[in-house]
Image: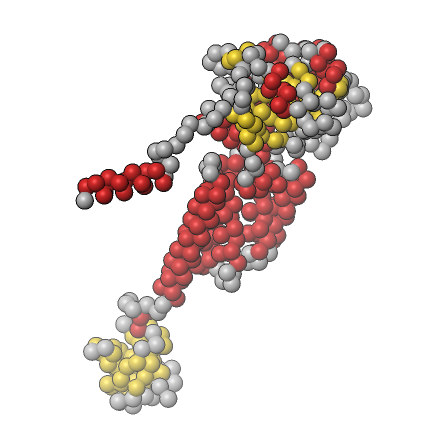
Amino acid sequence: MRRMLALLVLFLLWSAGVTGQEPEKPFVLKVVISEAITPSSLDRLETALHEAERRKARALLIALNTPGGLMSSMDDMIRLILSSPVPVITYVSPPGSYSGSAGVFIMYASHVAAMAPATNIGSATPVSMGGAPEDASGSDEIPEEAGKSDAVNMKRKTMNHALAQIRSLAEYHGRNRNFAERAITHAENVTSSQALAIRAIDLVAESEQQLLERLEGRQVRTLPAPTTLSFKDVAIVEMESDTRSKVLALLANPTLAYFLLMLGMLGIWAEIQYPGTIFPGVIGAICFLLGLYAMQTLSVDYTGIALIALALVLFVLEIHITSYGLLSIAAIASLSLGSLMLMREERLEMSLWIVGSTVASVSALIVFLMYKAGQVMRRKPTSGGEALLGREATVVHAVKEDGGQVSLGGEYWSARTRGSEIPVGQAVKVVERSGLVLFVERIH
């Protein structure tokens, strides 16, 4: 018996992958960033770095093709790259790709900056979303000293921050500082061969495999100590975009972000103007939270928590407001989006299954509890003065407008009627109570 139990335990451990697992072969993890730099890009990079460190990848290869994006997301991505113990290789590819604006900063922050032929880099001048307001004088120049125009002062602050940041990155990795500055001040842009000639990047490679071969034995500056790159016989494993990443990328689209924010504000305003319409307010609240995430006013974690909290509020409101299930549907949608945002699992299929089944179970349980709570709230009182209303009684002494007596549940009550006199023995129904006096009427 003991031997059988031991064999059973070994089989369960083996099936769970605890035993008999061969160590993973050397590999380089690849992540593709081929859109504007948004909170979604930041989340994808953070996930990729965590995965590369957990699985002990030789390096993280970023295939970059971006016109730029949000400086706030870019700043966080730079911090992640600089603090990563795993070497980060940013490779502008495939041919025809472009690394502009925020992409220049990410390239300069990376431990290795490389480009494919027929690609270009530059044009990193900071701009405001929707265009910045101009100076009252109409001048396009930025004065050296602070002036009265807040718009110009803000532009100066942004420009000086960008210049200092790109200089520090250039000095940190020993890359061309002059080009980096001109990419900001003059929106300068160069080809891959020009970038290599002026040492703005480390090398040009026609393929990812050739890139790794040329990097063999090179030492890069990582924390806490420099790393010597070794890519002999390594495989390139691409990290696929999961459902969560695709949803976040869709929400972070600048056009959709602005639309969600405006739709959210309009929906909330409509609910305030016309209380009880439900639909505008519910949709507005969800869209407003998603719009705040897309604008990076709320982080992905805070947005997820806020959506789950909103779902709970909507479930509770379902008890008190007749919405014909609309509040429950909106609550389930909010709960699903919030759970998806908070999900940070490495195994996509298991995570989606867990999230889906959990949301379905919790939603079903809450709807059931809300239904039962509604039944209890709609049930007639069984105690207290309200419990007497509608009950039948028998007239003991004739009931008139000025008095009488009835028997109810073994008790005698003073009674009155607003109609004609009710004789003894007549069955009556309690319609009102005033203190210790019951108002009754005949049961026809």
Foreground residue, 418 or 407? 407
The image position of residue 50, as x and y in percent, is 48, 28
* Camera-side residue of 337 and 292: 337
Q: Is residue 276 left or right of residue 416?
A: right
Q: Which quarter of the image is occupied by the N terminus?
A: top left
For the point 47% across and 49% down, which residue is it? 356
Residue 229 falls in image quadrant: top right
Q: Count up the numbered dots.
A: 0
Which residue is situated farthest in the right direction here? Answer: 138
Quadrant in which the C terminus appears: bottom left
Q: Is residue 425 left or right of residue 273?
A: left
Residue 81, relative to residue 423: is it above or below? above
Q: Is residue 164 above or below residue 207?
A: above
Residue 25 visible here: yes
Residue 230 spot, x, y in % from top left: 53, 16
Residue 18 at x, y = what percent?
35, 34
| Residue 145 in sight here | no
Colour style of the rendered protein structure: secondary structure
In the shown orientation, is residue 117 left or right of residue 393? right
Q: Residue at x 52, y 45 (%)?
A: 337
Q: What is the x, y in percent for residue 4?
A: 23, 43
The residue lying furthest to the left in this view is 1
Q: Residue at x 52, y 12 (%)?
A: 228
Q: In front: 261, or 137?
A: 261
Give the residue drawn at x 51%, y 21%: 58
Q: Nearer the viewer, residue 61 or 37?
A: 61
**Quarter-of-image position of residue 157:** top right
